[in-house]
């Protein structure tokens, strides 16, 4: 099978022009088939504030009300997505910017209201991903850049966590490619001590994950990231890594530097 790199970049890196440019240079230089999924939560919050739409969260997760879905559609699908595509084009990478609604790549369902009404948030329909249309791009040397937006097939855009999109697309494409999923962010990997970049945990199994949780060493955004990483591994993705955006190139080799997730 052909190798495919599914790379996710988070909002903290996107929000810093120098870090973003360095990351995109590395991404552009990855040989062969690749796909980029981006976040941008931090930027959506900032632009929302500027427009007088304050972000609301429950348990650290954004509530996407009517005003917020418009903001995130503009920010993720417009500002961030097109900025990344233009910069990749400048670096010789023939990128195409897409949301999950484009070419029906990621159909989703609006999250049912239970204790919390998250609003216009989409849960990916894992078996419904349109991999054939993705492959049309990939096999013709066009690099998809996916925004964290899906659709309900009834005309609504839905806000969807970027880590989850990366995991879902990696799983769906692993039937056709030998996939390595790489989560890139602003730390060297999952750390024993979140303030010490020299404390990278090189391998996390389910047992080690449980231990780290019991020790209280993991909190906030790293939790859904690790959950999504295990989802991907357990659904057939060959390799999943969590590492620094600056280490992307190294993490495409056999001599990886971040955290490897394994069963
Ligand atoms: N043990 C840990 N190792 C690394 N990061 C951790 C750890 N515990 C908590 N975190 C937090 O998780 C964050 C990453 O999640 P998130 O902000 O969602 O990433 P992204 O930029 O990809 O969206 C880090 O910035 C860090 O503050
Ligand atoms: C439903 C949901 O969680 N949507 C996320 C999508 C953006 C995202 O995932 O951005 P990062 O990767 O930069 O965190 C949000 O609006 O924050």
Image (cartoon, rainbow, N blue to C red):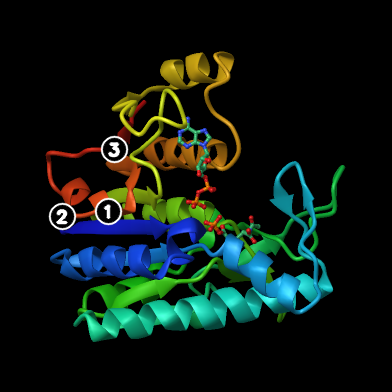
Q: Mark 3 or mark 2: which comes first in sequence?
A: 2
User: At 57% from the left edge and 14% from the top edge, which residue is drawn?
Assistant: 214
Q: Which circle marks residue 21 in the picture?
A: none
> Label 1: how many residues lie within 10 Å, few (<14), some (14-19) or many (20+)?
many
Q: Can you tell which mark lies on residue 1?
A: 2
Q: Earlier in the sequence, mark 2 or mark 1?
A: 2
Q: Position of residue 60 (x, y in %)?
A: 70, 45
Percent of width and height locating residue 99: 52, 76
Q: Secondary structure at mark 3?
A: loop
* CB at disc 3 and ligand 1 closer than 8 Å: no
Which one is in front, 76 or 44?
Answer: 44
Residue at 55%, 66% in the rendered image: 148
Residue at which label 3 appears: 258
Q: Is residue 162 above or below residue 140?
A: above
Q: Is residue 253 visible?
A: yes
- Of the 4 image quadrants, the one containing the C terminus is top left
Q: Nearer the viewer, residue 93 or 83?
A: 83
Q: Are marks 3 and 2 in contact (CB under 8 Å)?
A: no
Q: Check the image and report above or below for 175 versus 38.
A: above
Q: Residue at x 31, y 52 (%)?
A: 174
- Find numbered disc 2 in the image and state the secondary structure of the residue it sits on: loop
Does 51 sit above or below residue 14? below
Horizontal side of 78 relative to 253 (left or right) equals right
Q: Position of residue 195 (x, y in %)?
A: 45, 32
Task: Indicate the position of residue 7 as horizontal and vertical percent values.
Answer: 34, 57
Mark 2 is surrounded, within 10 Å at the Cα level, by few (under 14), some (14 to 19) or many (20 or more) other residues, namely few
Per the image, the residue denoted by label 1 is 246
Task: Say left or right for 36 vs 82.
Answer: left
């Amino acid at each position: 099978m052909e190798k495919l790199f599914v790379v996710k970049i988070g909002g903290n890196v996107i929000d810093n022009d120098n870090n973003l440019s360095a990351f995109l240079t590395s991404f552009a230089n990855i040989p062969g088939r690749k796909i980029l999924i981006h976040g941008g939560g931090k930027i959506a919050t900032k632009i929302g504030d500027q427009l007088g739409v304050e972000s609301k969260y429950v348990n650290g997760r954004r509530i996407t009300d009517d005003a917020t879905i418009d903001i995130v559609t503009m920010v993720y699908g417009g500002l961030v997505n097109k900025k990344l595509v233009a910069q990749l084009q400048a670096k010789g990478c023939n990128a195409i910017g897409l949301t999950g609604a484009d070419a029906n790549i990621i159909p989703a369902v609006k999250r049912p209201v239970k204790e919390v009404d998250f609003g216009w948030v989409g849960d990916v329909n894992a078996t419904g991903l349109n991999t054939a249309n993705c492959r049309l791009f990939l096999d013709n040397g066009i690099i998809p850049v996916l925004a964290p937006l899906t659709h309900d097939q009834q005309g609504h855009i839905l806000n969807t966590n970027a880590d989850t999109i990366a995991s879902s697309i990696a799983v769906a494409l692993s039937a056709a490619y030998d996939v390595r999923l790489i989560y890139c962010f602003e730390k060297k990997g999952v750390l024993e001590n979140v303030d010490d970049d020299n404390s990278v945990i090189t391998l996390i199994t389910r047992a080690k994950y449980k231990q780290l949780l019991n020790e209280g060493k993991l909190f906030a955004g790293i939790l859904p990231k690790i959950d999504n990483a295990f989802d991907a591994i357990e659904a057939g993705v060959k390799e999943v890594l969590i590492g620094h955006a600056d280490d992307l190139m190294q993490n495409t080799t056999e001599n990886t530097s971040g955290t490897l997730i394994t069963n």
